[in-house]
Image (spheres, rainbow, N blue to C red):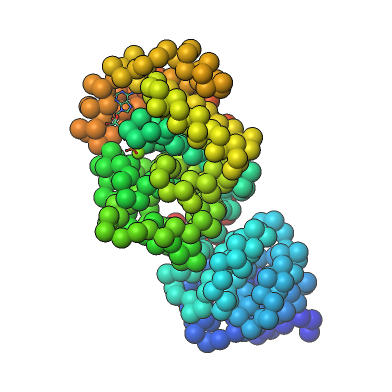
Amino acid sequence: MSAAEKFLDPQGSDDIASECVAFVSDNQTHDVVESVARQFFDDPYVRDGGSQQALDYLSEAPTPTVLIVDIGDSSAPLTAMLSLTAAFSEQTRLIGIGTINDINLYREMVGAGITDYLIKPVTEKALAAALCRTEETTHSTASTDTSEDKLNKIAVVGSRGGVGASTVAVNLAWLISQDRSHKTALIDLDLEFGTVALSLDLEPTRGLREALESPNRIDSLFIESATAKLTDKLSVMATEETLAQQIEYNADAIDILFDTVGRTNTCIVADVPRSAFTVRQRVFEECSKILLVTDLTLSGLRDTMRLMAGIEETAPGKPTFVVVNRTGGKFQAMTTGDFQKALGHKVNFTIPDDPKSFNLAANNGKPVVQINSRSQVSKAIRKIAEGVSDLVDGNADGSSKTGWRRFFKRK
Ligand SMILES: Nc1ncnc2c1ncn2[C@@H]1O[C@H](COP(=O)(O)OP(=O)(O)OP(=O)(O)O)[C@@H](O)[C@H]1O
Ligand SMILES: [Mg+2]
């Protein structure tokens, strides 16, 4: 009997390969994997073993849709996983289970195309979340490419306090998710004074601070619990941290947060505080474009120049768009033309001053583009959404035509 025959037909039955195959090395993990896999697949194949047994299996059996491999015993877990990625088709989703809790290892794995990496002891909840995410990533790759390159990561930062950066971030995220149909995550990185949750009448979510301080905690389950779903297509991470303690940001957290959130979204809109240096720099490096919001004041001009110089230093050549907000308002100190000349950079978008519309939106806890979509401000913000979201419209939520949801028992 060949290895495949042994695997596929251990009892001598005519059984064929399973859509979900797992090789695990201890009883506890075995029980968890067996129990959770049964909730998702008709006939999961869970056996004792690790990467070598998985390789033997793959060499002779059809590739499964999901492969779960315990690499807890391996001295070189990444190499063990990489040997597996080489052996299966693009459609296969690979989940590793290991004992090493190291964020760099996690990132290397994900960077190498491994769908998830779970640390022992694996809980049912964590594995179920990983399988759900597996399904989502399969849908995404089946319909649109949500790879790093295609993920639209838009950072919004204000030149000064109160110029309207959060307003732009919230309305932009709404338009990209609702009008342009892209699964979008709106992340308020201003943990202390952020206004995103307030302006959308949402309970602040928990966990963002922990994520930014201890990125090794970030995984799909963690992200899910730190996210509020505003609509099917728009999820929000926005917290309201105590002012009594200093926040110890870890710059690496930004990459990991974006990577993880980006696996189930096609767009990230980040509201970036000017004050948190570490976060600001890393977001500028990580994002695909920056919206710099300012008013038409002298201080706004000076700080737009300083921020642009900072961006050039940190992320040279990063596409940066200048948004002049509240044109025609009572604080306007110069014309857009003069501002542009002095700045030496094009003003890409303008938004008129319209306190009435924004007050209405604030009182309703909704974006102005939703509550008063035909107003001049909404039209202006729509132009920004059209200008900066170079994603292809429609069907970007990962709805798959070829979908393998049918393989799942649970919907
Ligand atoms: N075009 C506009 N017309 C009238 N009011 C506006 C306009 N844009 C923003 N506002 C209002 O200005 C106020 C400040 O906006 P917002 O909170 O977005 O600024 P911010 O730059 O994020 O501030 P902070 O520096 O505190 O984060 C809000 O009350 C908002 O409704
Ligand atoms: Mg703000």
Q: How many marks?
A: 0
Instruction: Judge whether 326 appears above or below 253 on screen.
Output: above
- The residue at the point 42 percent across, 12 percent down is 335
Q: Residue at x 74, y 69 (%)?
A: 83
Residue depicted at 66% across the width and 75% down the height: 77
Residue 152, can we see it? no
- Can see residue 118? yes
Compared with 110, 318 (above or below) is above
Q: Is residue 326 left or right of residue 256?
A: left
Query: Measured along the vertical axis of the image, is residue 111 above or below residue 385?
Result: below
Q: Residue at the location (48% across, 12% down)? A: 337
Q: Quadrant of ligand 1?
A: top left
Going by the picture, which residue comes out furthest to the left?
Answer: 363
Q: Nearer the viewer, residue 137 or 63?
A: 137
Residue 95: % across, % down = 59, 67
Image coordinates for residue 249, horizontal then vertical, percent: 44, 57
Horizontal side of 317 relative to 35 (left or right) equals: right
Looking at the picture, tell me which residue is in the foreground, 336 or 217. 336
Examine the rendered structure and indicate whether residue 91 appears above or below residue 158.
below
For residue 28, side relative to residue 65 (left or right): left
Q: Nearer the viewer, residue 124 or 35?
A: 124
Q: Position of residue 174 (x, y in %)?
A: 39, 35
Toward which corner of the image does residue 360 lie, by quadrant? top left
Could you say where residue 159 lies in the image, as x and y percent from the top left? 42, 32
Task: Check the picture and name the quadrant holding the N terminus.
Answer: bottom right
